Structures are given as structure tokens and as C-alpha cells.
Amino acid sequence: MNWKRFWVASLAVFVVIQAIDYIMDIIVLKKVYESLQSFWREDTVSKIWLAYVMALLISFLFTYIFIKGREGKGILEGVRFGIVIWLFAIVPMYHTLWVFVPIPYALIFRWTLFGLLQTLVAGIIVAAIYKPSAPAKA
């Protein structure tokens, strides 16, 4: 495993996912979240560090799993991987949450779509950074 590319890809995934989260949570869904204020924890600010630690862990695992299963097929492989991870983790997670928490399905749907965007972009990033080495020139 090329550790330098692993760390670069993992950190790039983390940064991009955090940027998409910021756009989603602070800009796009701000009014929805305000309307559901009674559902959120009052002490979120004191616990937010854990969300960042988990996002970093997910970024490392996302990259690691991609690298270990990589077939060297380029960007489309990253797209495929992003879709598989979305179907494996994001779709079930949000829909299961909807079963237990009285959140409007419209919010679950938006989270699921943003999750697709995140996993697609993350897959493309990892595939681009961890692309096969060019053949040596003679």
C-alpha cells in the first residue's frame, strides 16, 4: 500500500465530506433544522468533537476499503464504489433512523441524496488520488 497516497486520499475525503456537510447543514437545511429544534440535543456543541472523530475514521476506512478492493479501473471504479457504500451504509442508516425518530421523511430523503453526493465525490477523489501508476517509459 502506498501510505502517502492513502493519507492524502483519506484527508481529502475528510475535507470534502466536511465541506458538503457544511453546505447541507448550514445553508440548505438550516430552516428545516430550526423547525425541528426540539429533536436535537441541547448539548450538541460540547459533543461535536466526536462527530469529527467519526468522520475522520470513516474517511480512513472508506479509503482503506477502496484501496484493498481496487481493480485499477480509474474514476468509474470510484463512482461504483461510492454507489456501493451509499447503498450499504447511507440508505439503510437514514431509513432505519426514520423508523425510530419522528423526523419528517423529506429530511431523510434529503440526507440520503446528500449522502449519495458525498460517497460519489469521495469515491472519485480516492480513485483519482490512488490511480494506477503510469507504466515506466523505456
Image: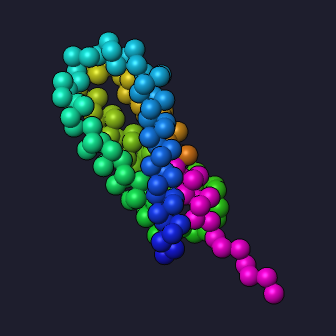
- Residue 79 x/y as whole percent: 58, 51
- Residue 96 x/y as whole percent: 28, 36
User: Of residues 41 and 85, which is closer to you in this image?
Assistant: 41
Please give the name of the residue rendered at 23% of the width and 30% of the height, measured from the top-left corner.
44
Q: Which residues are magenta?
A: 122-138
- Residue 10 x/y as whole percent: 46, 57
Please give the name of the residue rendered at 54% of the width and 57% of the height, measured from the top-left corner.
126
Considering only vertical position in the picture, is 84 above or below 69?
above
User: Of residues 14 and 126, which is closer to you in this image?
Assistant: 14
Magenta stretch contains residue 131: yes
Q: In the current view of this chain or complex, which residue is farthest to the bottom?
A: 138
Considering only vertical position in the picture, is 6 above or below 96?
below
Residue 1 shows up from this direction: yes
Q: Quadrant of residue 72?
A: bottom right
Total numbered badges shown on the rendered structure: 0
User: Of residues 4 and 90, which is closer to you in this image?
Assistant: 4
Q: In the current view of this chain or complex, which residue is farthest to the top?
A: 35
Q: In the current view of this chain or complex, which residue is farthest to the right?
A: 138
* 64 on left or right of 33: right
Please give the name of the residue rendered at 71% of the width and 74% of the height, measured from the top-left corner.
134
Please give the name of the residue rendered at 23% of the width and 24% of the height, measured from the top-left corner.
40
Considering only vertical position in the picture, is 27 above or below 12?
above
Residue 109 shows up from this direction: no
Viewport quadrant of the C terminus: bottom right
